[in-house]
Amino acid sequence: MRTPDYWPQATRELGERDKVLRGLIERFQGLALGSRGDAFSTLARSIVGQQISVKAAQSVWNRLSDRLETVTPESLSRCRIPTLRACGLSGQKAGYLKDLARKFVDGTLDATRWPALEDEVLIGELTQVRGIGRWTAEMYLMFHLARPDVLPFADLGLQKAMRLNYNRGRPLTLPRMQKIGAAWAPWRSVATWYMWRSLDPIPVEY
């Protein structure tokens, strides 16, 4: 797992302009955004993690890995739905993973093209896949491609962290969140990562 080259510059600039982030950056020194796998496993992990806790998602992924030995497009496409459900996946998520695997196997999805695409173009392409909404696409951009300026407003952890850190736990409107986030550009992925750390010091990796 390699720290993005821009991380030192991003943390320096964010710390200079935002006292909340300055405190978090000082508190969580030595930690950075990272990915654990290839394009397929990053997307598959994101689907597994939808709407469940990080701990629950890791448990499901561990059972899936134990069953398949290696989670690849080929192994997943061969796996039957009941087997996937026995690993703790809902029927819907099992279907999403099978669909994702098939698209990688038949070449419908070609991850070698994606690094050259702009953020919104790639989000548009990824969200054409069943089970991949904007949040999942944004997690891919952040964790696999290490794009520096992604701000996933729909992320419940980010919403909670912004309420706690910027509004004493009271609800924030979307325009207010956007205004806070605008000050983080062009390092909004980094700021989001530190917002997550304020809730859970253990980094999430996809």
Image (tube, helix red, strand yellow):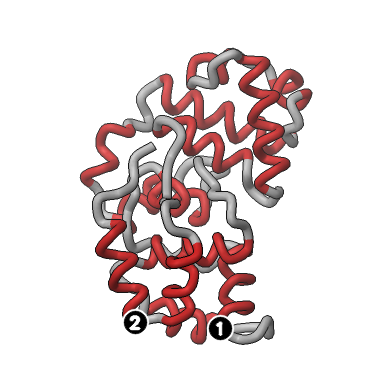
Quadrant placement of the N terminus: top left
Q: Secondary structure at mark 1?
A: helix
User: Residue 118 sits in which quadrant?
Assistant: bottom left
Task: Give the residue displayed 49% in from the left and 38% down from the top.
Answer: 43
Question: 47 above or below 20?
Answer: above
Instruction: Give the residue number, with chain letter if any, for mark 2.
Output: 17
Task: Give the residue displayed 54% in from the left and 49% down from the top.
Answer: 203
Q: Badge 1: how crowded within 10 Å, few (<14), some, or many (20+)?
A: some
Q: Position of residue 117 (x, y in %)?
A: 25, 48
Q: Which mark is residue 166?
A: 1
Q: Which mark is residue 37?
A: none
Q: Position of residue 171 (x, y in %)?
A: 66, 83
Farthest residue, direction left: 116
User: Residue 126 sits in which quadrant?
Assistant: top left
Q: Badge 2: how crowded within 10 Å, few (<14), some, or many (20+)?
A: few
Q: Name the residue type under label 2.
A: Arg
Q: Position of residue 77 (x, y in %)?
A: 55, 18
Q: Earlier in the sequence, mark 2 or mark 1?
A: 2
Q: Nearer the viewer, residue 4 or 16?
A: 16
Q: Secondary structure at mark 2?
A: helix
User: Residue 78 sits in which quadrant?
Assistant: top right
